[in-house]
Amino acid sequence: MFEDDRDPLAPHVLLTPGPTPLHPAARQAMLRGMLGHMDPEVFAVNGEIQRDLRVMYGTAPDTFTALLAGTGSLGMEAGFANLVEPGDEVLVCVNGSFGARMAEMAARYGARVRQVTAPLGQPIDPAAVAEALEGAALVAVVHGETSTGVLNPVPEIAALTRASGALLAVDAVTTAGMEPFGMEDWGIDYVYTGAQKCLSAPPGVAPVAISERALARHGARRTPTPLWYCDFEGLRDYWERRSYHHTVPVNLHFALHAALRAALEEGLPTRQARVQALGRAVLAALGPLGFRPFVADPAARLPTVLALRLPEGLDDAGLRRALREREISVTGGLGPTAGLIWRLGLMGEAARPAPYRALMSALEDLLGERGLVDRFEAALEAVPA
Ligand code: PLP
């Protein structure tokens, strides 16, 4: 499973919940010479990206897919900009910072926002969504809430939303490409991610997929899309009709193309298996020190962002600073969880033994905790091939 475990001498060990270490194929693709954004070779690459994104998101055969020229937040914003008109009711699931960001964006585009909330560290309850659905034109939910390490029950929320007639927008920033995702089977109308997360490409493009229903809703708008740059029709001009809209970041397309291909060639089952195996090994190594999963319900734990409650008395900032001095980046909590948790990234190329081996070895040294590395190695070896 880990035969791809390479680059142990990489100068920096990036264990953050994004960006993730570059995939070697993405790094190589970045070296390709510049081509024009209207060049036939670029359109050919774009076509392959569109095809591979359909596989990654599990879309219907002809679903429109594209890259937006921006990070994951642009993916989020483009959904609201195109699918919300002033006065529309939008139901947003909020159980962390990124759900809250969705609610703020929807409001800025004139939506009357209602929220379904859950306490930090807990998933959204589909029954609460069912109760609040009436009148909503659009429902929005984050699949993997990076700020707390929670996996929200998107398939259940999608079934309810589809039955109500509302559209569903899903943030798949920490899941797509690493965890199962079924746009068509689950019934999702708009989905986005960021290149720098599970795909391990450089930040700067946001892969999106837009359902026929969402395109039809957009086509029936009473008002023009207020965000010209990402107007769905403008995107289709370039990606489908091959006419100029704006100058796309060609080199980032090359890198994303290579990383996405590599991910599909590796296969989702293998990618999922290495996330699970590493997550278990990290817990086995750090558990005896007093690190505990922040998310109580194992079924609600986001495999790709391991949120760990810190042991009593651990100097969070001091320890992370000491790790940074050894070229190891670890991220703490966000907002209310600052000082309370670490969020260890297990997305894309971060989910490899080598970078975590480096972390365990540094912690063994810094904390004077003998046996940490051995526990990590033993847990990894216990993984069935
Ligand atoms: N949504 C989620 C779940 C995220 O984790 C992030 C970034 O961490 C974003 C959206 C925003 O993405 P970006 O920082 O690429 O704009």
Image: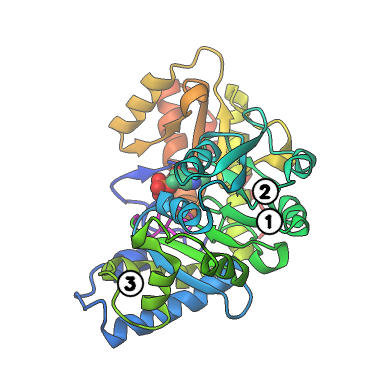
Q: Position of residue 33 (x, y in %)?
A: 19, 75
Vertical relation: 274 (above or below) 41: above
Q: Position of residue 159 (x, y in %)?
A: 76, 57
Along the polypeptide, which appears first: circle 2 or circle 1?
Answer: 2
How many neighbours does mark 1 have within 10 angstroms: few (below 14), some (14-19), or many (20 or more)? many
Residue at 53%, 50% (x, y): give it. Answer: 174
Say which residue label 1 marks: 166
Q: Position of residue 360 (x, y in %)?
A: 47, 35
Q: What is the three-letter code of the residue carrying label 1?
A: Ala
Is residue 150 or residue 110 the one in the foreground? 110
Residue under numbered circle 3:
254
Q: Badge 2 is on which residue?
A: 136
Q: Quadrant of the C terminus?
A: bottom right
Q: SS at mark 2?
A: loop
- Please report contact status of discs 2 and 3: CB closer than 8 Å, yes or no: no
Residue 193, image x and y in percent?
Answer: 48, 56
Q: Secondary structure at mark 3?
A: helix
Q: Please report the bounds of the magenta region as a residue range.
A: 193-203
How many other residues sit within 10 Å of disc 3, few (<14), some (14-19) or many (≥20)? Answer: many
Residue at the farthest front position: 222
Confirm or reject: label 1 Cβ below 8 Å from ligand 1: no
Please state which amino acid type lies under the numbered disc 3: Phe
User: Hey, which quadrant is residue 302 in on the image?
Assistant: top right
For this view, does 88 lie left or right of residue 298? left
Main SS type for the magenta part?
loop
